[in-house]
Image: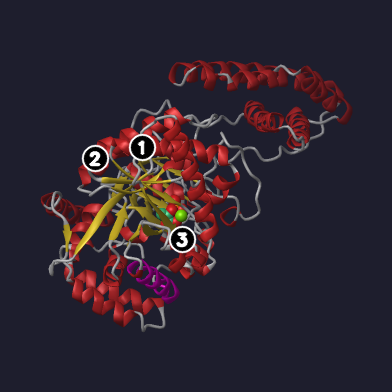
Amino acid sequence: MAPVSNAAVKGEHIFRGIGVSPGVIRGRIVVMDHDHNEEPARRHIPKEKHPDEIDRLQSALTETRRELSVIQSQVQKNLGDSESAIFDAHILVLEDSTLIGEVKRFVETENVNVDYAFHEVAEKYAHALEKVEDEYLRERAADIRDVASRVLNHLTGHSQQDLSHITEPYILVGHDLTPSQTASLDRELTQGFATDVGGKTSHTAIMAGSLRIPAVVGLKDASENVVTGDYVLLDGFNGLLVVNPTDQTLFEYGQLEKEQEDLQIKLLEIRDTKAVTLDGHEIMLSANVEQISDTAAVLDCGAQGIGLFRTEYLFLDRKTLPDEEEQYTSYSRVAQALAPEPVIFRTLDIGADKISHAIGETDEANPFLGWRAIRFCLARKDIFRTQLRALLRASISGNLKVMYPMISGVEELDEANALLEECKSELRSEKTEFDENLEVGIMIEIPSAVLTADVLGTRAKFFSIGTNDLIQYTLAVDRLNEKVADLYDPTHPALLRLMQMTVEAGKRHRIWTGVCGEMAGDPAAVTLLIGMGINELSVAPTMLPQIKYLIRKLKYSETQQLVQEVLECESSMDVLVQARAMVQRAAPGIFHTAI
Ligand code: PEP
Ligand code: MG
């Protein structure tokens, strides 16, 4: 029997989105608040009520100060003095007599409600600060807004979402989650999550994979139609959020879970084997990692190393940049843990949906086409140099390789390599050891890189195709935008041709080509990638055992034949049908995939 529900929707209701992290989970949900920081409505307040409004303001300020002091002491305990000092600046905003005085005058002269007055005045201050040259002062605009939203929550009776009092496991449902919010979810209690926005390769989705919890994004308005306490079934394979599942639905899912349990046993049996096809063709199968703490999962899942370590996650969710020493310690710890297997550290790919408060928000109309990854690093050589030095120093701790993201042409690669050479010279003169033969490769994720792969191949030791971005840049489809998610098409003939061209360029230069985008973890896509001659696949640890199982059930010759046929296909649907059919034939139990 499904537990009784107090749901906003009555009876079973299915919301359809995009499954981004496999698995099925059932349980009670917690719905995250929508953003309450919209402008408060302006209301007329007669003169005799002004003192009440001012009293409301005073108690909201007192409450906010109390709240901030609690947070500050928690942060001090967990993270240290420098992080907790941020809250000194926040508390100062509450004590700013010019600001508070102006709010009171606003109420008295305009006869308005204090929440409206507070919002107007705080916005005016924040706006003015945003325009100044000085970076430090500009950042204070964010402090004012942060504090203002807390004060407004007290004035309007909304409370800031605090999940710390929840002690039972829950499934989180919300409009959106940022990558850093996802990274800081309580790993014990959060059993899955579902959001209204987002696409299959949003970094929030990728983080869900590393957390090993089922996740569905792109559910459009689901979060507005459910309430905390609703009983749901979340299907991360097929991208479904089923509210109030019927007994029949629960029964059917019970069958699916049983099949999955049987499969898990088979997957465990092949954990320590290699990814070799039935006719003896070996694929290097490695894992994608976002956080140092994930390295244990890499060893557990039977990977042959790390094919993509997204170093930018060390830079998120913090107020100051990690220095050379901190980065060196992190990189060498990972390299050591995986030695002698390789670890490919991708240099900082900050920007777009991965915003670091330590670097500051950049206001860009098209952030995915903007100041991101290698472009950012070449403009901020101070930050890039620190990372390259840390990586070079860590290179003696294991089998470490480096890879640059978002290379669009040879000049960027030359400039990055020139900086790397400078760092090497510095280290030599400091008599600091590093691996003189450190291999440096590049990500192929922009069509211009594919088209110039012949030149890039003379300077790179390997290519790793980032299909998440290659698809978005080839098809002009924003990878985060659920409105165009159906155009985000991994089997589009254009994409297959670009990947084939990359493999061929790699072969001509006798360098290996891998794939580290989400496509490498998708069974149907894997049949195509192997047939194209891809040498390495780097996938989320959660998907890796399935992919190994599939590879071991395929024949290289049949995948090559498949690629010959699909390269003639005019539509992506024809490609998909043929690729799926091959998975069905070879490994029927694993066919749960989003493409
Ligand atoms: C990619 O673009 O495919 C990739 C692996 O990099 P990211 O998802 O971090 O942009
Ligand atoms: Mg990318």
User: Hey, what amino acid is under mark 2?
Assistant: Ala
CB under 8 Å between discs 2 and 1: no
The residue that label 3 is drawn on is: 445
Work out whether residue 184 can be spotted: no
Q: Is residue 164 left or right of residue 119?
A: left
- Give the residue drawn at x 25%, y 53%: 544
- Give the residue drawn at x 20%, y 48%: 302
SS class, disc 1: loop
Q: Check residue 104 for magenta coloring.
A: no
The residue that label 2 is drawn on is: 339
- Give the residue drawn at x 78%, y 30%: 121
- Tell me the quarter of the image containing the C terminus: bottom left
Q: Earlier in the sequence, mark 3 or mark 1?
A: 1
Which segment is the magenta one? Answer: 492-507
Q: Check residue 496 for magenta coloring.
A: yes
Q: Position of residue 99 (x, y in %)?
A: 78, 23
Q: Mark 1 and ligand 1: say if the CB distance to the nearest ligand atom is below 8 Å.
A: no
Q: Earlier in the sequence, mark 2 or mark 1?
A: 2
SS class, disc 2: loop
